[in-house]
Image (tube, rainbow, N blue to C red):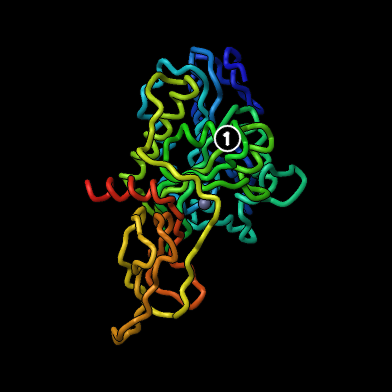
Amino acid sequence: MDSDAAFTYNGGKVAPGERQNLRYGISETYLGDPVRIPVTIVNGERDGPTVFLSAAAHGDELNGIEVVREVAFEWDLDDLAGTIVCLPVLNVQGFLTQQRYLPIYDRDLNRSFPGDPSSTSAKRMAHAIFRNFIAPCDLGIDFHTSTRGRTNMLHVRADTEDDAVSRLAFAFGASVVVDGAGSDGTLRGEATRAGVPTITVEMGQAHRFERRLIDDALDGVESVFAEYGLQPGPVRWPGWRTVVTEKTWIRADAGGIVDMHYDRGSLVHEGERICTITDPFKADGVPVEAPFTGVLIGLLENPVVYPGNPICHLAELDAETARIVDRRQTDR
Ligand SMILES: [Zn+2]
């Protein structure tokens, strides 16, 4: 969109040089009250791209909310070249009840995009969000965390086969990019297919504000703004980078209490013991070893497993990258 023009949505417009905080109605409750999502639109005086920043499509994933709020309210945006559309809480009912899904029939809002105005309640809400605040954008970042009980190292998910998406993914400057087209109905997948290149940023765990990750994500947004000319600044290089094509969740082969030996983001070498599955009597336990050298991008937080439960998501590293990561982690 040419942001010489105002940003318009159904029922409103934000002219260049203006900022608007609104609560936009996307549905109605059992009591007939409006369900309204908070939206902040900042239209810079100068021309530039329109970018959306969204969070809490899963209602209990909080880290991204703080990232979006700080960009909207703590950054100096006086010289912004372009427009930002800040959507800190997409799934209002899930947020109110602190759960992942919409409480109405447990629907996943992040499988309901681009939505449909005459379909289910979830798809109607998704449609109202998508048509007004996603489709008019040039690119977007959707923030998530791991599912409850697990945690993620900060990483980007993106379809790197798509040049426009890959430019955005690399501009964010995370070390790990997990490659893949977003599933049907996800905000990332559907926005990208609708011509709005979008990445997902995964960071930390549900139900928390994790300061170090929030700061890291803010650096990523700053770097994206620099890449697309919204604000001056360097595009960051994270020191090392790997594009992961295969998702390898290592699963428990025994039930028990998990004694984890590494933190998220750690490098583990092939054959090293990632964790030990123990019993209540602290007997020998079942070791879980790394099948290859890689970095732990996802990890169990709630330390109990049935056989078959995921323990960690290990991303394979080539020998050269592993050497760089090794050196950086020993230097810390
Ligand atoms: Zn999520």
**Image coordinates for residue 200, horizontal then vertical, percent:** 52, 43
In the picture as drawn, the residue positioned furthest to the front comes out as 319
The answer to which of 222 and 332 lies nearer the viewer is 332
Which quadrant holds residue 135?
A: top right
Does the beta carbon at disc 1 come under 8 Å from ligand 1? Answer: no
The answer to which of 151 and 103 lies nearer the viewer is 151
Residue at the spot x=75%, y=49% of the render?
119
Reply above or below: 206 against 28.
Answer: below
Reply above or below: 139 against 110.
Answer: above
Q: Amino acid at mark 1?
A: Val
**Image coordinates for residue 86, horizontal then vertical, percent:** 50, 33
SS for dot 1: helix
The answer to which of 127 and 290 lies nearer the viewer is 290
The answer to which of 3 and 217 lies nearer the viewer is 217
Reply above or below: 304 against 222.
Answer: below
Reply above or below: 327 against 282.
Answer: above
Q: Decide if residue 61 is on the left or right side of residue 286.
A: right
Residue 5 in view (yes/no): yes
**Image coordinates for residue 217, horizontal then vertical, percent:** 39, 39
Quarter of the image with the N terminus is top right
Residue at the spot x=68%, y=38% of the render?
193
Packing grade of label 1 (10 A; few <14, some 14-19, many >=20) is many
**Image coordinates for residue 314, horizontal then vertical, percent:** 44, 59
Q: Which residue is mark 1?
A: 165
Residue 31 in view (yes/no): no
Residue at the spot x=45%, y=80% of the render?
254
